[in-house]
């Protein structure tokens, strides 16, 4: 009976995977979607491609370098950007799945965790944007998988992956902790290796601190301004919203106003279960537990709410929450197996339906045609999209966005010379 249930679950996951993958790939037909972050990344790459130096402004430059290479190869467009995001997302999910299996978690749990990540609205929302999340997910997922392998080759591979991850996002610094925990049993027996590993660790930490100096200075300023207790309370409130939105698979902004308190309470419970599960993970995989702790130490102090902060570890977050439920049930002398299976299945179905609905909504926007400026975003860039490829620029258009649309939007003809970006050669 259990074998039949497991087989049915895998078939269900396979069908949902095919449907979701098809909808994700259809997003390649979208016009170029821009947000403040994607404008920043794409402008940096475009500026470098036109012969100027990379200007990082205290931010990692890994993703702009990737876009720069696509531009220099002559293949960058909204389509290649979305397809590359899909590729990196698929690699991140595959590596996460293999990592969970290698660590001894059940195939069913690993499949469910990756399926929830695939259909998370946070992934759907950002798959069409020129941002670093999915490239980082692939690098971090690959590093986790390499940690489960044997052989001396994995240490140079991990060093390269951590370096690249830090250059893509400051969060890459969290990878230093699992690598150090995994390497400790090997290096503590040899003093020379201990010196080399310690030096490499210090270099990695120093590089991460330098890359993230803006993050630390900003948080220290907030801590000085609000005080410790208020700072901690604000952070917990912001990230309770993260977990609440991930749990409901819907952004709070799309829910009725009265839902805010229930969402924050549900998120706080989910966060508590995640913490409990992270402790429980330690007995099975110390490096994975250390990785989750390191990510929390970097994410939780950041006084902004966005579920995408957790996207690169979302499969592990799902697993940790499940283990947290089991741990709490054991403490309360309850039987986790006695929980209604139908309730869990109903939640999974609703979660998947909401994720597919988000993909359907994104597909509707993708094929909006002339209605795209009216359907996409919050309206701030609507005048720029309406200006499009032929009308003269006006005071209401964003010059950087208009330049990106006229150069890289595949629906547009070449940009008029008179509307070039100021300072462009």
Image (tube, rainbow, N blue to C red):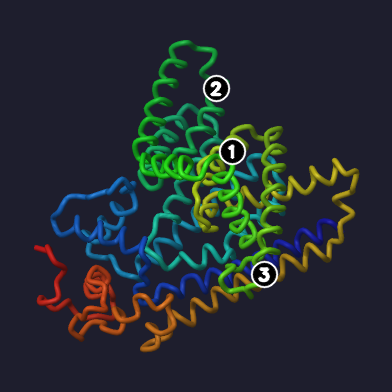
Q: Is residue 145 visible?
A: no
Could you say where residue 86 lies in the image, as x and y percent from the top left?
A: 45, 63
Give the mark, 2 or 1, whose residue is nearer the N terminus. 2
Residue 43 image-quadrant placement: bottom left
Q: Nearer the viewer, mark 2 or mark 3?
A: 3
Give the mark, 2 or 3, whose residue is nearer the N terminus. 2
180 is higher (above) or lower (below) than 299: above
Could you say where residue 100 lies in the image, as x and y percent from the top left?
A: 63, 45
Query: Can you identify the residue that label 1 sits on?
Result: 293
Report how many numbered discs are placed on residues in the image.
Answer: 3
Residue 255 image-quadrant placement: bottom right
Look at the numbered disc 2 and give the secondary structure of its residue: helix
Could you say where residue 250 lies in the image, as x and y percent from the top left?
A: 61, 68
Q: Residues within 10 Å of mark 3 (few under 14, many from 20)?
A: few
Outermost residue to the top: 191
Residue 76 circle label: none
Q: Is residue 139 left or right of residue 228?
A: left
Which quadrant is home to the N terminus? bottom right
In the depicted view, which residue is nearer to us: 138 or 10? 138
Query: Can you identify the residue that label 3 sits on?
Result: 259
Q: Residues within 10 Å of mark 1 (few under 14, many from 20)?
A: some
> What distance separates the C-alpha of mark 2 from that of mark 1?
17 Å
Q: Nearer the viewer, mark 2 or mark 1?
A: 1
Query: Can you identify the residue that label 2 sits on?
Result: 184
The residue that appears at 51% across and 57% down in the rendered structure is: 308
Give the mark, 3 or 1, whose residue is nearer the N terminus. 3
């Amino acid at each position: 009976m259990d074998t039949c249930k497991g087989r049915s679950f895998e078939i269900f996951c396979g069908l949902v995977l095919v449907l979701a993958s098809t909808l994700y790939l259809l997003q390649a037909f979208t016009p170029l979607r821009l947000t403040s972050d994607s404008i920043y990344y794409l402008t940096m790459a475009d500026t470098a491609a036109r012969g100027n130096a990379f200007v990082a402004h205290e931010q990692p430059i890994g993703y702009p370098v990737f876009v720069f290479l696509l531009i220099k190869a002559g293949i960058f467009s909204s389509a290649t950007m979305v397809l590359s995001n899909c590729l990196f997302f698929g690699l991140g999910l595959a590596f996460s799945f293999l990592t969970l299996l290698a660590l001894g978690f059940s195939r069913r749990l690993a499949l469910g965790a990756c399926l929830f990540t695939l259909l998370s609205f946070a992934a759907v929302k950002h798959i069409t944007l020129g941002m670093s999340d999915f490239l980082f997910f692939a690098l971090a997922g690959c590093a986790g998988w390499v940690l489960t392998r044997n052989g001396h080759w994995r240490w140079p591979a991990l060093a390269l992956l951590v370096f690249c991850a830090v250059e893509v996002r400051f969060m890459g610094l969290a990878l230093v902790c699992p690598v150090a925990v995994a390497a400790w049993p090997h290096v503590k027996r040899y003093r020379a290796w201990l010196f080399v590993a310690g030096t490499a660790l210090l270099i990695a930490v120093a590089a991460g601190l330098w890359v993230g100096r803006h993050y630390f200075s900003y948080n220290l300023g907030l801590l000085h301004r609000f005080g410790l207790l208020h700072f901690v309370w604000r952070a917990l409130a912001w990230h309770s919203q993260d977990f609440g939105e991930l749990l409901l698979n819907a952004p709070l902004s799309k829910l009725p106003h009265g839902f805010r308190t229930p969402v924050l309470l549900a998120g706080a419970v989910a966060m508590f279960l995640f913490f409990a599960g992270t402790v429980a993970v330690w007995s099975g995989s110390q490096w994975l537990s250390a990785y989750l702790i390191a990510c929390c130490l970097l994410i939780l102090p950041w006084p902004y709410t966005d579920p995408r902060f957790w996207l690169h570890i979302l499969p592990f977050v799902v697993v940790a929450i499940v283990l947290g439920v089991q741990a709490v049930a054991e403490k309360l002398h309850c039987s986790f197996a006695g929980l209604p299976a139908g309730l869990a299945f109903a939640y999974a179905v609703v979660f998947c339906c909401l994720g597919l609905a988000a993909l359907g909504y994104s597909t509707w926007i993708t094929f909006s045609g002339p209605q795209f400026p009216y359907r996409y975003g919050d309206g701030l860039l609507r005048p720029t999209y309406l200006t499009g490829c032929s009308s003269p620029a006006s005071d209401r258009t964003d010059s950087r966005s208009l330049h990106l649309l006229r150069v890289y939007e595949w629906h547009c003809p070449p940009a008029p010379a008179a509307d070039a970006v100021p300072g462009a050669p």
